[in-house]
Amino acid sequence: MSDSSLLNQLIESLRCLPGIGPKSAQRMAFHLLERDRDAGRQLARVMDAAMERIGRCERCRTLTEHTRCQICANARRNVSLLCIVEQPSDIVAIEQAADYDGLYFVLGGRLSPLDGIGPEELGLDRLEARFNEPELDEAILAISPTVEGLATAHYISELARCSSLRLSRIAHGVPLGGELEFVDGGTLAHAFAGRQGL
Amino acid sequence: MSDSSLLNQLIESLRCLPGIGPKSAQRMAFHLLERDRDAGRQLARVMDAAMERIGRCERCRTLTEHTRCQICANARRNVSLLCIVEQPSDIVAIEQAADYDGLYFVLGGRLSPLDGIGPEELGLDRLEARFNEPELDEAILAISPTVEGLATAHYISELARCSSLRLSRIAHGVPLGGELEFVDGGTLAHAFAGRQGL
Ligand SMILES: [Zn+2]
Ligand SMILES: [Zn+2]
């Protein structure tokens, strides 16, 4: 059935989802059409709204449909702590695993001059401005310990030198070369407790 | 982040897809939002259209957005052959695997009186009408050999008795390349009962 039917279009479109091959896409399409059209309609509606309305938090750069995300807007978070992560998904992992109640800053990647990713792309000017805010005591680097991640951490530590800030990085348990979002909760909690001054 | 944010709604909605747990749903949401919003918009559009517009073929009951599906509408298919399957996905499997060029009829399930699935729910009145169409020579049952499937096949064979139709069923037995010791007992028994002279 390699045709242009709506069913085939649905199966093809589902393959844009990561990890979904032709067999899984087909199973998903038949499942929704035969057993759960309401869920399919709801998914279509929410997905369209999400693609249109979700932007970046003006303060921490994570994904949100508001000007400020729910963490930055939460008055009970500890404003003296700032955790610097690569991706919005890292925030989800830390919130679920670690006992951290401070704020976040999302770089959106790692320094990679060859790919055109410099300090500007990572919002490091905005991060430097936050380093100079008086309520901030400590910034915690939670960046994957890859070559590019270590270079990024080094660059950030240079930015912090002019301020009175304590700078630390999470340490124990994060495996070298490991992506933060795939690390289990216990390891992440350890890494937070064992953070070390830079 | 167990909140009502649009991001969380998207992750929750993605879990309506079969085989998608919370981790996969989260990975899909971040992937679309950070790397492929156009694909997300396209998927939302196609999914909405599919849920609204895909119905059943008036002739074979498979899923299609047209009055007749592309197979029933194809004048080059062999109208003397009718293959009876349980689900639209069975048609896809047969079209991909077998050298079959006849037509199909989709039951949409198996007889199961306790679940309220009787002859009417499976469209057996319409199937009986097709059995009496003069161009039809042979009907092939491609129904899973479960208890309910065998009962359904038996019921259909009774419907065919009054017509001059040849009725057959696809062979049940040990799958090609299958190790005998891993084949279930029911299948083995079928394979023995259906043994063929060499
Ligand atoms: Zn924020
Ligand atoms: Zn049809």
Image (cartoon, coloured by chain):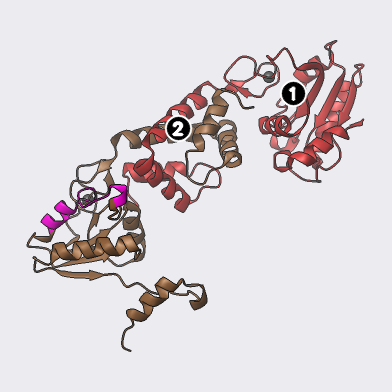
Chain colours: A red, B brown
- What amino acid is at disc 1? Tyr
Residue B82 seen in render: no
Q: Nearer the viewer, mark 1 or mark 2?
A: 2
Judge left or right: residue A194 versus residue B60. Answer: right
Question: Mark 1 packing: few (<14 Cα in 10 Å), some, or many (20+)?
Answer: many
Compare marks 1 and 2 and give the one earlier in the sequence.
2
Q: Which residue is mark 1?
A: A104
Above or below — where is B124 with respect to A161? below
Q: Position of residue A10 (x, y in %)?
A: 39, 42
Q: Which residue is mark 2?
A: A43
Q: Which residues are magenta?
A: B114-130
For residue B158: magenta? Answer: no
Q: Position of residue B187 (x, y in %)?
A: 40, 72
- Which of the labelled discs sits on residue B113, or is there none? none
Return the residue found at the far left: B134
Judge left or right: residue A162 versus residue A92. Answer: right
Q: Secondary structure at mark 2?
A: helix
Quadrant occupied by the C terminus of chain A: top right
Instruction: Look at the numbered disc 1 and say if its residue's Cβ is closer than 8 Å to ligand 1.
Output: yes
Taking the spot 30% from the left edge, 67% from the top edge, the residue there is B99
Q: Position of residue A25 (x, y in %)?
A: 45, 47
Q: Quadrant of residue B29?
A: top right
Judge left or right: residue B36 versus residue A190. Answer: left
